[in-house]
Image: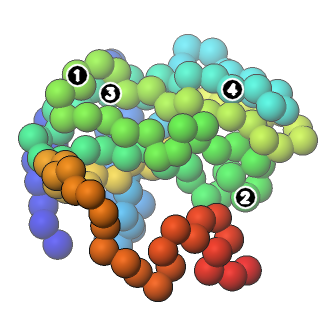
Amino acid sequence: MERIDVLIRTLDGATIPVYATDHSSGVDLCAFVDEPVILGPMERALVPTGIFIGIPDGFEAEVRPRSGIAHKHGVTVLNTPGTIDSDYRGEVKVILINLGNESFTIKKGDRIAQMVFKKLARVDFRPVASLTDTCRGQGGFGSTGV
């Protein structure tokens, strides 16, 4: 597995992201809030993490939901996956939404999302008159079965 260095600056008291296990794909992002944030059903909030990162060129970070709070409480990342570009230097924040039926409270230090780093490829679009044929062709949503 390739390893990369990601520079990080934190606000005083913020949690540096860590992998929960040796085989975790993403690091846990923790809330950095002064007061608890209560998300009612169908409410969303931009939750700060207190971290600022320097992602190397050629990589991105994707912010994804944590399966536990998604399954148990219906809380997920609204723009999943949220992309953090390598030239962004602002605070990492997470847009959470409560799709559950009960209010959900977010406290300082709570693990609210995960962040996965991915290598990127740059594309150059080459205009053509037609594309090669495939078995699927132009079959869209649901065209390959249930």
Q: CA distance from mark 2 to mark 4?
A: 17 Å
Q: CA distance from mark 1 to mark 4?
A: 24 Å
Q: Is residue 144 visible in the rendered structure shown here?
A: yes
Q: Earlier in the sequence, mark 3 or mark 1?
A: 3
Give me the disc on residue 89: 1
Q: Earlier in the sequence, mark 1 or mark 2?
A: 2
| Disc 3, SS | strand
Asked whether, in this view, residue 22 is left or right of residue 64, the answer is left
Tally the numbered discs. Answer: 4
Give the residue number, with chain letter if any, for mark 2. 71
- The residue at 37%/46% (across/down) is 62
Name the colour scheme.
rainbow
**Extreme-top residue of the structure:** 34
Q: CA distance from mark 2 to mark 3?
A: 26 Å
Give me the disc on residue 51: 3
Q: Is residue 130 above or below residue 125?
A: below
